Amino acid sequence: FFCQSPAPSMLSLLLLAIVSGSHALLRGACGSAACVALGGGGGGALLKRPWCRLSASAPPANAAPERLGARLGAAARSRVAFMAARSSAATEPLPPTLLPITFSVFAQMIGEGIAISSLPLHMTLLGASPLEVGLATSCFSVAQMVCCPALVSLSSRFGRALVLRVCLGGATLSSLLIAASGSTAGIVTGRFCAGVFAASVPVAQAAATDIVSGPQTARALSRVSAANQAGVVVGPAASALLIALFASCGVAPPLRLRCAFAASAVLSLAVLVASVLPGGRRNAESVAA
């Protein structure tokens, strides 16, 4: 029909132009100004139609592309600046006040590593029954489960540094009890005392979150966890080395493991004394703050 004569071809071009304009209007490409123009004298009836409301909210067709590019570029630059600041904060060195906290955890967990690896054999040599060996192992966990939440709650009230010192003092006392005891009852008592004060890890984690913030928090918590696991790993090896050393010095076999617990008590006491000295006290005050 459109190609039969030159005159209808002009008509066809006009019809095609009308159809393409209507299609653009329906797609919302003409913007709100076109909708108002089409509404004309009809009182804005076309603006009540859904497709016209969509076109009113769409950006105008003659919007400058450079404005959109500028907005996108500003958003991208702000995102890049935020990520760069976050990355630089994450790579900054941790504060030195975190060092005594990790040492406290390491010193207490060395004694636990010695007890896990060597205490059952030592109690068997003393004539303890399997029930007594299991009791000495379980009483630590029971005491820790009951007393650890209370110590963490007290650290929020009286300060992390004070509770960490109390935990170190309890670790020293429990190791000395096991070292000085030659009976099963004394060893069970020492293990129960060790469980009562075995809250250094959660208190140290709370202290780490008090010292640092933002991206450094994960690094500080990983340091505390690494000190915890290092103590558990080093403890059995230190026990074996100390027992071999005391054997080479002529110490009787029943006393070798007791001497190893005495060495663990000396280490915990040394870390406790270092935290009380002026330099350690300043670090502790910053932790408590």
Image (spheres, rainbow, N blue to C red):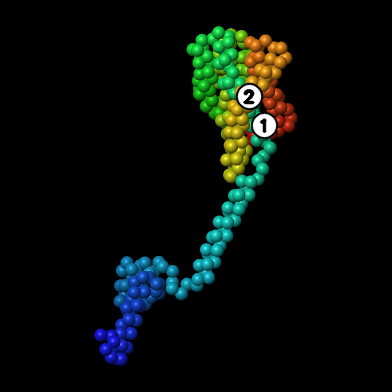
The residue carrying pointer 1 sits among few (fewer than 14), some (14 to 19) or many (20 or more) residues within 10 Å by Cα, namely many
Question: Residue 77's quadrant in the figure?
Answer: bottom right
Say what secondary structure mark 2 lies in.
helix
Q: Residue furthest right?
A: 278
- Residue 210 placement (x, y as % from top left): 60, 37
- Residue 131 placement (x, y as % from top left): 49, 12
The residue carrying pointer 2 sits among few (fewer than 14), some (14 to 19) or many (20 or more) residues within 10 Å by Cα, namely some
Q: Residue furthest bottom?
A: 6
**Sequence-wise first label, 2 or 1:** 1
Look at the picture and state if 87 lies above or below 61. Answer: above
* Residue at figure coordinates x 50%, y 71% from the top left: 65
In this view, the residue in front, 159 or 269, is 269
In this view, the residue in front, 289 or 96, is 96
Question: Residue 267's quadrant in the figure?
Answer: top right
**Residue type beneath disc 1:** Pro
* Residue at figure coordinates x 58%, y 37% from the top left: 221
Is 226 on the left or on the right of 35, as rendered?
Answer: right
Location of mark 1 (residue)? 100
Look at the picture and state if 177 lies above or below 88. Answer: above
- Residue 238 placement (x, y as % from top left): 65, 23
Location of mark 2 (residue)? 237
* Residue at figure coordinates x 30%, y 91% from the top left: 6
Question: Residue 246's quadrant in the figure?
Answer: top right
Is residue 62 visible in the rendered image? The answer is: yes
**Residue type beneath disc 2:** Ala
Marks 2 and 1, Cα distance to the nearest angstrom? 23 Å
In this view, the residue in front, 140 or 36, is 140
> Which quadrant holds the N terminus?
bottom left
Say what secondary structure mark 1 lies in.
helix
